[in-house]
Amino acid sequence: MTTEEKKAEIIPMLGAKVEVWEEVGKDYYKGTIYNPIMGDNWCCGMGDKDKCMETLVRHAKYDTDANWQLYAIDWIENQGYPVHIVKKTVVIYSNNTISSPSIWNGTKQRFSTKKEAIFEAIYQFSQYLKTKNNAKEI
């Protein structure tokens, strides 16, 4: 899976969305994503819903920027999932204690950078939530 495909899975978890821009008309879309560097929402607007989402994915820096990664890790921890990061290893636990089973355990993974390890952990958590939410719907 490519970096862009993984970012496309991560950003909805953190609140990014594409919706009809009511003020402009039903054929115009507004994409919104929280920018942790600026501390506000970043928006794009265009007439194609898919291109709008692609723009949000390109703008999201969860793979390369520590501020974006810290925002995502804080969000995960605020949902009640402890995150433990040591060098290039990331573990996300299933409930409020680090003695609980892990959702993602990167100890057996080999990453070249800490940012790469954190990005993969954020992506894996997004997949865990997606599976968990799908199971609730059944």
Image (cartoon, grey):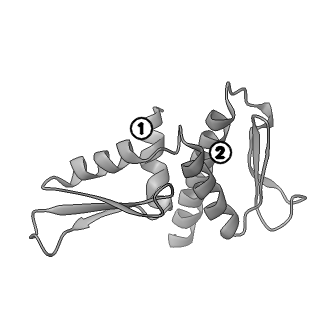
Residue drawn at 52 percent across, 45 percent down? 62
Instruction: Say left or right for 130 vs 115.
Output: left
Residue 102: which disc? none
Instruction: Check disc 2: other Cα within 10 Å, few if <14, some if 14-19, many if 20+.
Output: many
Taking the spot 47% from the left edge, 44% from the top edge, the residue there is: 61
Q: Residue furthest front?
A: 38
Residue identified by numbered label 1: 4
Q: Quadrant of residue 19?
A: bottom left
Amino acid type assigned to the residue bearing label 1 in the image:
Glu
Task: Give percent across and percent down for residue 12.
Answer: 44, 59
Image location (x, y in percent) of residue 71 = 59, 57
Would you say the residues marked 2 and 1 are in contact, meaning their CB atoms lie under 8 Å apart? no
Q: Residues within 10 Å of mark 1 (few under 14, many from 20)?
A: some
The relative height of residue 23 versus residue 51 in the rendered view (above or below) is below
Residue 106 locus on image (x, y percent):
75, 38
Q: In the shown orientation, is residue 102 left or right of residue 137?
A: right
State the residue in front, 71 or 119: 71
| 34 versus 111 height, above or below | below
Q: Which residue is mark 2?
A: 121
* Residue 8 rendering spot, x and y as whole percentages: 41, 47
The one nearer the camera, 43 or 77, is 43
- CA separation in Å, label 2 and label 1: 15 Å
The local secondary structure at tag 1 comes to helix
Residue ID at (34%, 50%): 56
Which amino acid, by three-letter code, is at mark 2? Ala
Sequence-wise, the earlier of marks 2 and 1 is 1
Residue sitting at x 50%, y 61%: 14
Q: Most extreme residue toward the right, as rendered?
A: 99
In the picture shown, does residue 78 fall above or below 87? below
